[in-house]
Image (cartoon, helix red, strand yellow):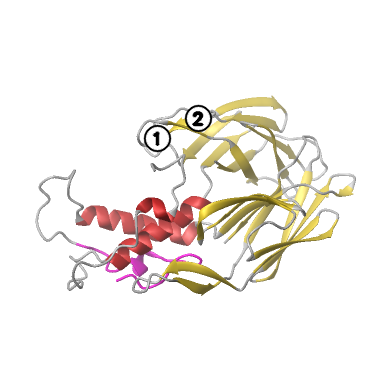
Amino acid sequence: MATVSGWPNRAGRNNFGVDDMEDERRTVDSRKEFNADQANLLFGQDGALGLIAPKAVFLATDTTLIYGAFSWDQTRYFNETSGGWPSYFTIVATGTGIITFNFASTVLGRPDDVTGTPQSEPLTFAMGHAQANLSSSGNRTRTTIVRNTAISFTTSVIRDGTGAIDQPVMVALF
Amino acid sequence: MSGYPNIPTRQDFGPEMENVRPPVMPTRDLSAGQMNLSFWQTAGAGRTLPQALILFDGTIPGIVSQSLAFDPRQELGNITFVDNGVGDYTFTFASTYKDQRGADVAFAPLGAIAVPQNVAAGVEASPTLISGQDVTIEVVDAASAPLDAIILLQVWGG
């Protein structure tokens, strides 16, 4: 049995059931039969991806979500301006080169196995990394990220020699 | 839908599965719950994982290794790499890559993170995505002087 609901929760190999599934009978036609070795490999890989993949990645300025992908929101990518981004995500222009990204404390996750209704799941991030993706070459920036809370991160971009500068920032949160 | 460079949604894996009969033996009965979790995790990870991991050494210069999500059979040659000068490199992705069925699918880099490896404190890399298929990386030391370094580059695209 699966024992967790999955994204935005992490799921390791143990959450996919027993370690070593076995065939009830020998595979006769490997093109038409799904066998235990395949299931074990699939769940092993899924369990690994579920531990290392970012929960959220996005490229954003202080006014635009240029590219946003969220593991629990699997039907769409986001490319939005002026606050058109998903309701669980907000961008706050905190100062030149400084942006704060806030998330809701709960989001809709996987449908319940029995009812089919998406379940409300708690959202937390343990860490993240960020880097300016420059709009023109030669800026030589340094980017830092601060974890304010489990659902709030602030990035800061400094340009060599001239101080803070507004640039798009690529962020991956784990 | 086929897989990379397409990124399947959960719906592309089919509807929520149901058990034909209650699973009895966990070692032999594959349950709907297991498959539904697998589909959900795969679809979610596909959205957030980078499509390219490239380790390159600016002192050789060259690509030391690369892993491309759309090349799971590892048949493709290295991404096009140009050394523009000290600490200045450009990677150019093809405009299309083949999916699992052999169809050409458009691809363009959308974002990148480049991390210097095994270098002195203060070394910083800055990615620039100013051309449709190009990712340019500039590397400087703590005194802002360009230098060649080993870099791990992650690229998200679509």
Q: Quadrant of the C terminus of chain B?
A: top right
User: x%, y% of residue B33?
Assistant: 31, 67
Q: Nearer the viewer, residue A38 or A65?
A: A65
Q: Is residue A117 visible?
A: yes
Question: Where A77 falls versus B54 (above or below)?
Answer: below
User: x%, y% of residue B55?
Assistant: 55, 39
Q: Amino acid at mark 2?
A: Thr
Span highlighted in magenta in the image: A1-21
Q: Is residue A11 magenta?
A: yes
Question: Where B148 falls versus B8 (above or below)?
Answer: above
Residue labelled with disc 1: B74
Q: Is residue B151 visible?
A: no
Q: Residue at x 71, y 44 (%)?
A: A133
For label 2, the crowd category at 10 Å Cα-Cα, with few meaning under 14, some 14 to 19 and many 20 or more, is few
For label 1, the crowd category at 10 Å Cα-Cα, with few meaning under 14, some 14 to 19 and many 20 or more, is few
Q: Is residue B12 magenta?
A: no
Q: Residue at x 51, y 62 (%)?
A: A72
Q: Nearer the viewer, residue B15 or B116?
A: B15
Q: Residue at x 63, y 43 (%)?
A: B112
User: x%, y% of residue A86?
Assistant: 63, 60
Question: Where A56 falls versus B109 (above or below)?
Answer: below
Q: Amino acid at mark 1?
A: Gln
